[in-house]
Image: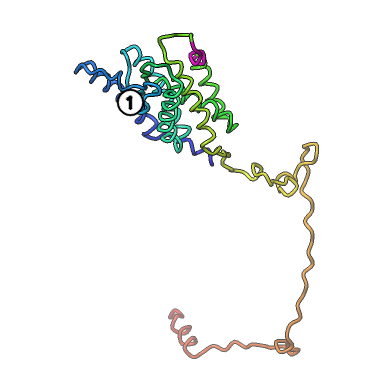
Amino acid sequence: MEENHFKFTNTVLGVPLFFVLFLWFVYWLEIRFGFDFDENGILPRTFSGLQGVIFSPFIHSNIEHLYNNSIPLLVLLAALFFFYRKEAMGILVYGILFSGALTWLIGRESYHIGASSLIYVLVSFIFFKGLQTQYYRLVALSLTVVILYGGMVWYVFPKIDETISWEGHLSGLIAGFVLTFFYKKTEFRKVIKYDWERPDYDPSEDKFMQRFDENGNFVNLPKPEIIEEVQTEMNPFFISNSNVVYDYVETQESLNEKNESKPES
């Protein structure tokens, strides 16, 4: 895959903005009409709690909870759709489902809500996938994610903060890591502009490189080989030993034209 795989498109900003605005819209509906969406979250190991696998990322307990999730989602989703545009929608959908299902299996008997599990999916996928590709841009992205959100790893452990769903965070981290193996490792290569960038490049056959010796000193090109021309024998039918002489005879019309062109005395 060429480097032009990384292209800025409308989805790079459009999808993150739409997703985050939808989260705020859901929260606005809840406070405007007095809804209580918490019961639509994940309630582990209950049949009714399975609905939270889909709905829980869109439900938040308060505006601080929503605000703390909004900025990381904007940054990480934009990075995902720019650097992994072909895989982005799959990561988004399967990340929500996989992390939600795992939370349903291992979570405490309480409602688990919020998009933080999706944030951990994105952090985990971007970090581990960048290391797997070993491509310098994606490795740099992985290191950037570690610098920005590396401290989040502490919240996957229990008893760090009893008010947060560490099970959802851990599930998101595991889901993002597992998804890196479901998507084939993308091969990146630089666009080849010059012959010396090709893997089969041989300097000894390069006319320019032949002007330099082993120490890098300028030398003249080797003298070209003189190829003797092989004369082909002509068919005797086209060969004559007698000389051919051609006489030029003026026509009567050309003589008349010359006489007319003379000036009168």
* Label 1 environment density (alpha carbons within 10 Å; few <14, some 14–19, many ≥20): few
Query: Mark 1 is on which residue type?
Result: Ser
Percent coordinates x, y for residue 114 in the rendering: 37, 19
Instruction: Verify whether residue 181 appears in magenta.
Output: no
Q: Main secondary structure of the magenta part?
A: helix
Query: Is residue 6 found left or right of 139 in the rendered image?
Result: left
Applied colour scheme: rainbow
As helix, strand or loop, the secondary structure at mark 1 comes to helix
- The relative height of residue 214 versus residue 48 in the rendered view (above or below) is below
Query: Is residue 106 found left or right of 246 in the rendered image?
Result: left
Farthest residue in the front direction?
46
Percent coordinates x, y for residue 85 in the rendering: 44, 35
* Residue topped by disc 1: 48
- The relative height of residue 147 versus residue 187 in the rendered view (above or below) is above
User: Which residue is at the front of the view, 92 or 145?
Assistant: 92
Q: Which residues are magenta?
A: 152-158
Query: Is residue 113 found left or right of 243 in the rendered image?
Result: left
In which quadrant of the rendered image does the C terminus lie? bottom left
In which quadrant of the rendered image does the N terminus lie? top right
Residue at screen point 51% across, 25% down: 174
User: Which residue is at the front of the view, 135 or 123?
Assistant: 123
User: Which residue is at the front of the view, 136 or 68?
Assistant: 68
Percent coordinates x, y for residue 52 in the rendering: 35, 25
Quadrant of res 195:
top right
Residue at screen point 34% across, 16% down: 66
Residue at screen point 48% across, 35% down: 6
Quadrant of res 16:
top left
Farthest residue in the left direction?
33
Percent coordinates x, y for residue 153 in the rendering: 51, 16
